[in-house]
Image (spheres, grey):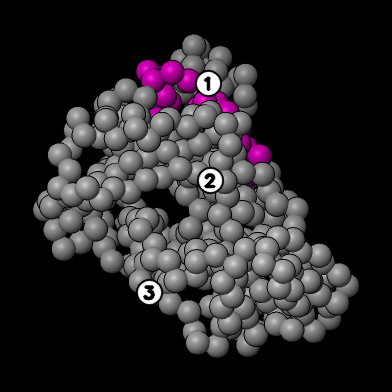
Amino acid sequence: MTDVLIAGSGPAGRALARACVTRGLTTAVVDPNPDQVWTATYAAWEDELPEDTPTTSRSTTVRAIAIEEHRIDRTYVVLDNTSLRKLPDTITRYRGKVAEHVDGPHGTTVQLTDGRRLATALFVDARGTRTSPSNAEQTAVGTVITSDETETTLMDWRNGDTFLYTVPLGNGRVLKEETSLARRPGMPLSELRKRLHQRVTPESTLEERVRFPLDVPRSRRLSFGSRAGFVHPATGYSVATALSLAPRVAAAFADALPASPRAARMAAQHLLWPPSAKLVHQLRRKGLEALLRMDAAETREFFELFFRLPPDLQLAYLSGRDDVKGTTTAMYELFRAAPWRLRAKLMNTW
């Protein structure tokens, strides 16, 4: 029996697996294709990440364009996928899909779709989330071009109801991505590809494709990453949260497992979702619903007002996962600054 079995070997699952091994826990990972190379570009604010997070590029100049251009005084980094994929040899890897798992007082039995049964003290679901027509989705299509650009443009809303995301990857390469921030259902990738090609001439047939749900509820079972509800409903970000929480969750496992698996599950759930984080998640979901009600002009106006907020309030809303005061203050100040026609949209959801 292993101490921890993690389903899913994406950035979140692997971060937790590495952290568990560091804490001396016997750890295994199960995934349909554990050797698959990641093609997605993961980026985050540097101040959200653990200090030892491997990165490939940094942008100290970050801007956002709604109606006007705004400079953001934070460093933005691209994560090093090769380093994040590495797992210690002591981690057991199972190739397969989880059919079901049953938690018991002394551990969990995990059954794979091929009939194999695995025994573990703790089972953590870190698989990705699937979308359905009922979900609010973020979708995007991107291409990498040769460019000497060094600035990150977090969003450029000068193209209607989608925005262009630009991030330097290093070595003269830049990712340009046409993004639909939030729609229910998501904007088709074919439409985003057409809009991207109107702005950028691709240098290759390779492209990044993004599609994931934003309105993922908090998981009541032991989960991690997007499966647990880490996705920021208003931005789509989740990887930084997973990387920063992984060592703390592994420590909770190591401290509580000598008592019982149930105690370890409870300790981890409280760490992942304290009351303050639950409330902030609910408030962010309200922000998502407000965005879904806005047309293109209202969306640009909304972000114009947001990026006029004081930097500490922007930081609180974007990154303060359990900052109730900062989140509510940011929402109140944005509402107070909004014209009445935009307030009406906010009032219906906030």
Image quadrant occupied by the N terminus: bottom right
Q: Does the magenta stretch include residue 282?
A: yes
Residue extending furthest toward the front: 114
Residue type at mark 2 is His
Q: Name the residue under label 2.
A: 232
Residue that carries the numbered disc 3 in the rendered image? 83
User: CA separation, marks 3 and 1?
Assistant: 40 Å
Q: Give the mark nearer the N terminus: 3 vs 2.
A: 3
- The answer to whether one can see residue 72 in this image is no
Residue 80, how many percent across, how many down?
Answer: 34, 67
Q: Are marks 3 and 1 in contact (CB under 8 Å)?
A: no
Secondary structure of the magenta portion, mostly? helix
Q: Residue 42 in the image: state x and y as whole percent.
A: 38, 57
* Relative depth, front residue between 69 and 22: 22
Q: Nearer the viewer, mark 3 or mark 2?
A: 3
Residue 177 location in percent, x, y?
29, 42
Residue 50 visible to an observer of this rendering? yes
Q: Look at the image and give the residue range highlighted in magenta.
A: 281-304
The residue located at (46%, 15%) in the rendering is 339
Within 10 Å of the Cα at label 1, are there few (<14), some (14-19), or many (20+) other Cα atoms?
Answer: some
Of the pair 181 and 67, the residue shown nearer to us: 181
- Which residue is drawn at the image coordinates 27% and 61% (left, top)? 58
Q: Mark 1 points at which residue?
A: 293
Please give the name of the residue rendered at 18% of the width and 49% of the height, measured from the top-left corner. 204
Crowd band around label 2 with a 10 angstrom C-alpha radius: few (<14), some (14–19), many (20+) = many
Q: Farthest residue in the top direction?
A: 341
Above or below residue 172? Residue 295 is above
Give the answer, above or below, for where 55 lies relative to 200. below
